[in-house]
Amino acid sequence: MLPRLDARPDVRKGGQFNYRLTRKGVVDKRSRDALDTARFEALLELVEEQLRQMGPQIYAGRAEAAPHRKGAATACDQCSYRSVCRIDPWTHHFRVLRSPEA
């Protein structure tokens, strides 16, 4: 799937995605963000299931903002709409992101 996600020709290092290819064109084993086929397919299935759950909720009018926090960083730190957003980062209870192992 990597050529579909990064279609730049003759590139061996990711820009948007953190990966590196070996001289043989195989994902370097030190590229921790790259997933093997089975794990990538499992991730896609999880995303599809979440989208199936979100669709009816959004259609029913339930689409609240629920930004996350991971450590000291929050989604609001990179958001372009902070100036008009009604979420107060000082008082908002952010969703905490944890690794699947946690």
Image (cartoon, helix red, strand yellow):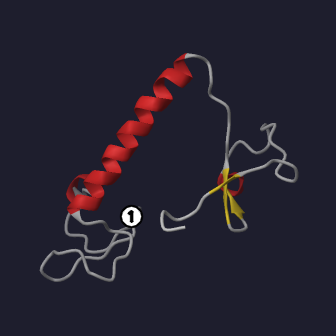
Is 63 displayed left or right of 47 in the figure? right
Residue 32 coordinates in the image, percent (x, y): 37, 75
Question: Which quadrant would the C terminus be assigned to in this image?
Answer: bottom right
Residue furthest out toward the left:
24
- The residue under the point 41% across, 62% down is 16
Tell me: residue 72, above or below residue 56: below
Tell me: residue 29, above or below residue 48: below
Nearer the observer, 68 or 42: 42
Identify the amino acid type marked 1: Phe
Question: Which quadrant would the N terminus be assigned to in this image?
Answer: bottom left
Nearer the observer, 95 or 19: 95
Question: Within 10 Å of the Cα at label 1, are there few (<14), some (14-19), or many (20+) other Cα atoms?
Answer: few
Tell me: residue 13, above or below residue 50: below
The quadrant holding residue 60 is: top right
- The residue under the point 61% across, 18% down is 61
Residue 76 coordinates in the image, percent (x, y): 71, 52
Mark 1 sits on what residue? 17
